[in-house]
Structures are given as C-alpha cells and as structure tokens.
C-alpha cells in the first residue's frame, strides 16, 4: 500500500487498535488529522483528557506517526 493512501489509523506503522483508540480520544480520527500536529502536544492532551500518565513509548509512536504524515503530505 502506498503511504499516502492511508485512510485508517491502524494502517499506520506501530498503531494498532489500542493506540488508535487513544488517538480517537483526542479527536484524531483519520491519519490526515495528524498533519501539522505536534506529537508532544498530542501526548500532553491525552494525559489531560484521561487523567492518566502514559508510557513515554506512546510519545515515540506519536512522533513517528506525525513525522510519517508530514513526509507523505509534502
């Protein structure tokens, strides 16, 4: 599948159902919602919405997902 053809969050590398559900909690519904987003802000927003401290590995996933979308959008 061509990278620019991603239409579901679960199609992105390292994003399965659990991480996709976390992204949806912060109003990221489709891969294009990640374009121009700050992964650190997304991570902080998730913590604020859930009232939980999340594993820093999740931040790594947010960084790679936003970077991939930035690369395939330009």
Image (cartoon, rainbow, N blue to C red):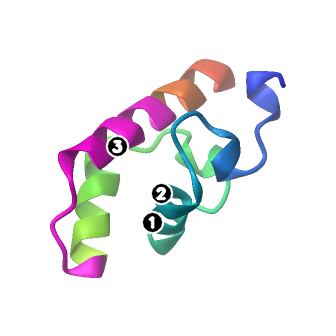
Q: Position of residue 12 (x, y in %)?
A: 62, 38
Q: Do we see residue 74 in this rendering?
A: no
Seen in the picture, residue 8 relative to 50 is either above or below; the reply is above
Determine if the magenta segment contains residue 65. yes
Q: Position of residue 62 (x, y in %)?
A: 39, 42
Seen in the picture, residue 9 relative to 71 is either above or below; the reply is below
Q: Secondary structure at mark 2?
A: helix
Residue 19 badge: 2
Discs 1/3, front: 1
Residue 22 badge: 1
Rendered-image quadrant of the N terminus: top right
**20 and 30: which is toward the camera:** 20
What whole-number distance in Å separates the C-alpha atoms at marks 1 and 3? 13 Å
Disc with the residue nearer the chain's start (3 vs 2): 2
Rendered-image quadrant of the C terminus: top right
Q: Position of residue 54 (x, y in %)?
A: 21, 61
Residue 39 badge: 3
Point out the stretch of residues depicted in magenta: 50-66
Residue at 73% of width from left, 51% of height from top? 8
Q: Do we see residue 46 in this rendering?
A: yes
Binning the other alpha carbons within 10 Å of mark 1 as few (below 14), some (14 to 19) or many (20 upward) gives some
Q: Quadrant of residue 38?
A: top left
Tag 2 and tag 1, C-beta contact below 8 Å = yes
Q: Secondary structure at mark 1?
A: helix
Binning the other alpha carbons within 10 Å of mark 2 as few (below 14), some (14 to 19) or many (20 upward) gives some
């Amino acid at each position: 599948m061509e990278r620019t053809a991603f239409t579901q969050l679960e199609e992105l590398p390292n994003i399965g159902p659990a991480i996709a559900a976390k992204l949806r909690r912060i109003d990221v519904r489709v891969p294009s919602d990640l374009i121009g987003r700050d992964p650190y802000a997304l991570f902080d927003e998730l913590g604020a919405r859930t009232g939980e401290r999340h594993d820093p590995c999740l931040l790594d996933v947010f960084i790679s997902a936003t970077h991939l979308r930035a690369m395939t959008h330009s």
